[in-house]
Amino acid sequence: MTLRSTSPHFASIARPLRGRLAGCLLLLGLGTGAAQATTYYVRTDGGSAAQCTGKSNAAYPGSGSNQACAWNSLHQALPAGGSARIVGGDTVYITPGSYMLGWGAPGASGGRCYDGGRYDCYLPPIPSGPSATSRTRILGTSASNKPRLWGTERVQYMLNLTGSSNVEIGNLEITDQSDCVEFHSDASARCKRDSTPYGQWAGVGIMASNSKNVYLHHLDIHGMANRGIVAGGLTDWTVENVKIVANGWAGWDGDIGSGSSNSGNIILRGVEIAWNGCGEKWQSRSPWACWAQTASGYGDGLGTAKTGGHWLIEDSYIHHNTSDGLDLLYMDGGSNSSVTVRRTHAAGNAGNQLKTLGKTLIENSVVVGNCAYFNGRDSMKSDDQCRALGNAISVGLVAGQDITIRHNTITGQGDCLILSEGGSSTSSLNIQNNALIGQVDWRSDLQGNTGELTCGHYAYNSSARLTYSGNLFYNVKQGQCPSGSTCSNPRIASTAIGNFDATPQSGSPLIDKAPYLAGLDKDFYGNARPSGSAADIGAIEVQVSSGHPPPSISKPLPPQLKQLGSGGSASTSTAAPATPVAGTTDDADSSVPAADKVSRAWSTLGRFLSLARARAWNAPAANLRDRPLELAWRTFTQQPRWLMAAADFFVDRWKEDGRADTPGEQAAHATQASRVEVAPGTSASAPEPAIEPASNSGERAQPVLPERGEMTRPLAERSTPRTSSRALASSTSTLAR
């Protein structure tokens, strides 16, 4: 409606009339560009778009059209052919159940989705929401019983965020129903691509580019034939309580070619990124067909192309990926880019556990560089083990920017625990209050340098300012012990690489020995720091109020990670088991006099029962080495309740006050300080099983393998050949991908 006049009198009437009309239109949701948001529903017993409006959470009654009932597929909301039936700002709720996506799914056919192009039967982009506070939402109705979206017939990707902004996706399982890996070098694991039917497999879980203000939460993305997420060109993404597990090529690949760089805040909180570079047996969710770059695969947990943005990774678990765990080597080093890793457990990745460039903060994390974990498994080659030298943490410095690594517990069997490279006199590296615990260098040992240890920290081709403060160095190459460091046995629960447990034990030199650092009031578990006269060195702060250290890292991880286990058949994976090992530092404490015969009796019995119980939980029955202890404990479990209670009492008393050393034991501990502590009968590179979190009863869970999780191009490889036991004299970058 247009009001037009040259008369001043008419104009004076028209102005208030326009105002009243605008107000009415605003109330009606018209004329202002803001449509009324609509809520839709998807149910397994719903109907087609012709049969149901999708606006009622009800089953299709069986007859009629345009009924008040739910749709039967997400394809009804977002058809491959024609216009989307939802608009920006709408919400689609999906009730629990199994939903096929791709060729043959309800509502999929039409447009680019036809028999000869089954791989193109993917959903169109989700419409952008009007604003960051008014998102388009695709949500399962329950985080604890996620609807299962599974792709079929080689569909390229499942959910499409190409050009989509202001979107929320949550409470969904995203997977396929095939064991295969696309383009795998092993024909028995390779997906069928040459002719139809291709099978019930899908390429990528989520595809995203040029996407802003997106919130992903409570997703379980696993078992995709190619990658879990392919996403670049992002701005202000938040990803919380998301699993990206056992996807055949990589977990999160940020290289989409042109336009890959990200900006704003990229937040990953409470995520698990694991077993990527492995296929998945879809019915059992166990990893298989693991491969990496030597076999023409890839295997990063998370990797990007050149990127900006402020990345925050916290309260997360990044483990057992077949290449690097977290690879942010290609940060652009600009003023609008940084990386923060906080309260994160990284372990078992075949390359570097954590890799960054430019402004970086790594704190309160446990980093276990058992980079030879996959040795001899599936299609993993020798050169894939401890690739890029297997340094546990690799950081690249740039001029004018600082890197701080503080209050972490770090071990590894690669070349170094921390490798830094580059930088100038205007950049700095601060290594503060870390526990750096060396192991035998796996690759060097393999090449004949028997027993050569990992180095603690090595600065390659760098003129950056370097500060060490309050660290503990132990069992590292050439006895590296920077000024101001503690250099003795850390006396943690276990230093064995296949069974590492970072929990300080009584009498540990880590306890109350760290200089105060402002702004650090929590530890790896979120417990108070300091707790005692001073902070503890390393990631874990012993809590003095309880009289005991906090649970070892084989127990459930922080609360944010517990949420990862909600929904479906998925189970929350935790760290490597922390079995007490006879002859290691867990049996040392001089707080009780050796002459106390009663305490020594408690100690002996408690120690035996604790070890027996731990091995019964963590060792397979067929393991003859552990069988006597296993049988001992399992015999106890068949006895009356009073005997079980007595056994638990002895174990608890041993842990509290029964671990006094005799003079002979003290001498044995002094001898141990000069070597790597390894479980009897195992090697330093022995792989460890992953375990589920402890039950509410406090008992250790049974060992299980964690769940499993047209992009075909792996990221460029910049390997540095190892020409000597150090291999740091090469002129090429040692931070190779």
Image: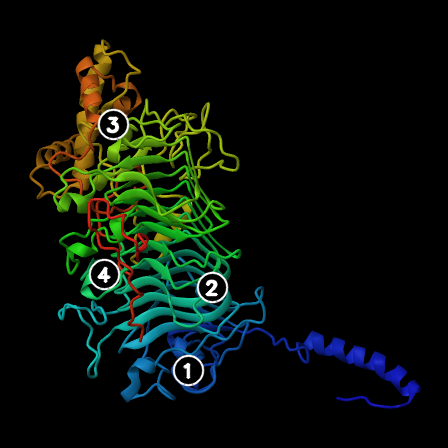
User: Where, by quadrant of the figure, is residue 582 drawn?
Assistant: top left
Corner quadrant of residue 513: top left
Residue contact at pointers 4 and 3, CB within 8 angstroms: no
Circle on res. 405: none
Closer to the chain start, of discs 1 and 2, is: 1
Q: Given this view, does label 1 or label 2 mark the residue nearer the observer? A: 2
Q: Is residue 645 visible?
A: no
* Residue in the foreground of this view, choosing between 485 and 133: 485
In the rendered structure, find residue 262 and report the number of the disc placed on it: 2
Q: What residue does disc 3 label?
A: 586
The amino acid sitting under disc 3 is Asp
Residue 568 placement: quadrant: bottom left
Which residue is at 61% across, 77% downward? 35
Point out residue 672 in the picture as x, y percentages from the top left corner.
Answer: 20, 26
What secondary structure is found at the residue carrying circle 1? loop
Q: Which residue is mark 1?
A: 79
The reply to whether dot 1 and dot 3 touch (C-beta < 8 Å) is no
The span from disc 4 to disc 3 (Cα, nearest Å) is: 35 Å
Q: What numbered label is drawn on residue 278? A: 4
Question: The residue tagged with tag 3: helix, strand or loop?
Answer: helix
Q: Residue at x 51, y 67 (%)?
A: 212
**Residue type for callout 4:** Cys
